[in-house]
Amino acid sequence: MSSVQIRDVRKSFGNFEVLHGVSIPIEDGQFVVLVGPSGCGKSTLLRMLAGLENITSGTISIGDRVVNNVQPKERDIAMVFQNYALYPHMTVAENMGFSLKLRNAGSDEINKRVKRAAEILALSPLLDRYPRQLSGGQRQRVAMGRAIVRDPQVFLFDEPLSNLDAKLRVAMRTEIKELHQRLKTTTVYVTHDQIEAMTMADKIVVMHDGIVEQMGTPLELYDKPENQFVAGFIGSPAMNFLKGHVRVNGVATFEGPNGVKLPLKSAPAGSDGRPAVYGVRPEHFTIADDGAEAEIVVVEPTGSETQVFAKVGGEQVVAVFRERHQFNPGDKVRLKPDPSVVHLFDEATGKRM
Amino acid sequence: MAVIAEPVAAQVKRSSLWSRAFESRNFLGAMFMVPAIAILILFLAYPLALGFWLGMTDTKIGGVGRFIGFQNFVSLSKDSVFWLSVFNTIFYTVFASVVKFAIGLYLALLLNERLPFKSMMRAIVLLPFVVPTVLSAIAFWWIYDSQFSIISWVLIKAGLLNHYIDFLGDPWNARWSVVLANIWRGVPFVAITLLAGLQTISPSLYEAANLDGATNMQRFRHITLPMLSPIIAVVMTFSVLMTFTDFQLIYTITRGGPINATHLMATLSFQRAITGGNLGEGAAISNAMIPFLVAAILLSFFGLQRSRWQQGGRD
C-alpha cells in the first residue's frame, strides 16, 4: 500500500493537449474515483498512472518514488481493464497466477495465493474453467483476482463495471467496495457513472475537458459543488438550473425566468442585480402556498418516490417527492425550493457564488 | 356432377402439392444445394474418381486402357525416379514451409508494429503473391541462369567470386534454388494471414501482460503464440498443401532437371502422363500424393481441435 501523488500532470497527443495540468493527492489506502463525461481525460490519466501512456510533463509518484520513467511492471500496480483483458487460453487459475509465474514464484506459492484470492472472490469452483466459460460477473471477478494475487501497492480500475448489466453492476459495486474495506489497498477507480462514484469513493475527483473541476468526499461534492458543472454532474436526477438575477430589496430573492420569484437565504455581498444561475436539487422542492407557480407536465412514480416534471416560469424542472401526492398532468401547484440548500452560480463563469 | 368436380379437385391438389413443396424447408434446401453439388461433382468428384480409375489402368493417350489393379503402384515402387521425386517433394515442402513460416511470422510481427509507411510496406510484401507464378518463375529462371545470372554477376563484380555459379545445373544447387523461389513466392501469403491473426489479438492483453511483468519475449511466448496458434495451423496446412502439390515454379524453372533432381511428384506425374503419354502411370503418381496430403490435413485438424479446446467453448 502506498500513497500516490499526481502533480501538475499534462498529456498531449501530438499538438493536442488532453490533460491541462492535473494535481491529485491520494492518501494511503484511499478509494479515489475519477469521474467525468467521456473524453475528459480520466482514462488517460489512469493509463499514465499505470505506465501505459507517457507523461508529457508533471510528475506521478507512488509512495516516495517518482515513477515517470519507471516501466509498468516495476511500478507494483495492478489494473482491472474495462474488457477485463483475461488471457483466453489460460484457465482462471493460470490467469490469476500468471504474474507470479513470470516472477518465478514457486508453484506452491502460486497455488497458495491463487487459492486465497479465489476464496475471497468466491471463484474456487471455477479455477479450472476458461474465460469463455464464465459469465460477465465471473470474468470481472477473475480480473480482480488477477489484481489481488499480486498484492500490489495500488489497484487501478478502468470502468470495470460498464460491460455488466444493471443489476450485476450494483452487486459488483458493493463487492468491490467490500474488497477495498477488507484489503485497504490504495485504489484509483475510473468511471463515467456518478452513482458508482458516489457510492464507492472516499474521495471523488470530477474531471471535465482535461482539468479537475472539484475533488472531495461524495457528500461535499453533493452539498457544496464549486461550479455548475459539478452541480449538474453529481446527483440523479440532475440539479435544476434556472437563469435569472439576484435581487436584494431588504430580503434577498432570485428573479427567475419570466419573473418567477424564488427564495434565497441570503445573497452574497454586492450581488444585487447580477445575472446568476439558481440551482436546486429535485428533492429540495416542497409544495407550499408561497411557492412558485408550476404546471405539472409528467408524473413518474417509482414506488419509493415520485418524479414530477413541471414548468416553472416556462422552464422545465424536476422535483422528487417521497410523499405520494395526487398529481395529474396540467395541474397547477406551488413548488417551493428549500432556501437553505439552494445553490447560486455566476452565470458567466459557472463558479459558485 | 362428380365427373365435373373431379378434375377441379385434382388441379387444386396438384397446385397445392407444388406450393407445399416450395414451402418445405427440406425441398427448398435441396434445390438450393443442386448448383453447388453439380459443380462439385463435375469439377471435383469426377476428376478425382477418374484419377483413381486411371491409376488402376494402363491407359495411354489416344488409347482405351484396361484395368490392371495395383500394377502401376507395384512398378512405381521399383522406380528410382519416382522415389527420387518423393524425396524431392518432401525436401522441397519441409524446407520451404519451415522457412516461409519463419520469415512470414517475422514479417507479420514487424508489420504489426508502428512503422513509418506501414501500408506501403504491406503492399510491397504482397507483391510476390500478386505476380503470376509463371512470370516470377521466369524471373527466377533468369536470376539462376548459368551465364546471365545477376547473383553471379554481382558477386563477381564485388570480387567475392571468380566464376559463375551453376545454379540449375548441379542437383543440390538446383534443389536449393527452387526452394528459394518457392519461399519468395509463398512468404506473402503466410505473412499477411498471420498479420490478420495478430490484429485480432486485443492490445489490452499485451497491456495486462505488461503490467503482470512480462518481458517482450514472454509476451510473445505466452500471449502471441498461443493466441495465434489456430491461425498458424490453418496457414501452415494451406502452405504445406500448396507447396507439396507445386507444379508451375518447377516446371517453368527446371522442368524437373537436372537429372530429375528437382522433379516433384506433380511434375513427374505430368511428365509421365502428358509428355510421355502414360496416363495410367501419371495418375498413379498423383494418387500416391494423397496419403501425404491426408496426413498433413489430419495433423492440422487435430492441431485446430486442440486449440479450440484450449480457448474454452461451451461446456
Image (cartoon, rainbow, N blue to C red):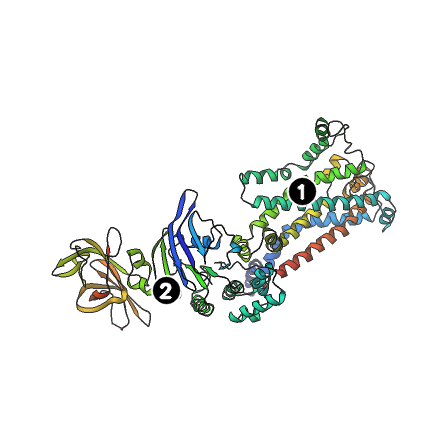
Task: Identify residue for label 1.
Answer: B186
Task: Identify residue for label 2.
Answer: A198
In the image, A22: left or right of B162? left
Q: In this view, does B141 lie above or below B56?
A: above
Chain letter of disc 2 in the image: A
Q: Where is residue B24 in the image (x, y as percent from the top left)?
A: 57, 60
In the image, B126: left or right of A36? right
- Kindly report which numbered mark, 1 or 2, lies closer to the viewer in this rendering: 2
Spot the residue most to the front: A64
| Quarter of the rendering occupied by the C terminus of chain B | bottom right
Q: Position of residue B169 (x, y in %)?
A: 80, 33
Chain letter of disc 1 in the image: B
Q: Marks 1 and 2, Cα distance to the nearest angstrom?
A: 59 Å
Q: Position of residue B229 (x, y in %)?
A: 63, 54
Q: Mark 2: which amino acid? A: Met
Same chain under badges 1 and 2? The reply is no
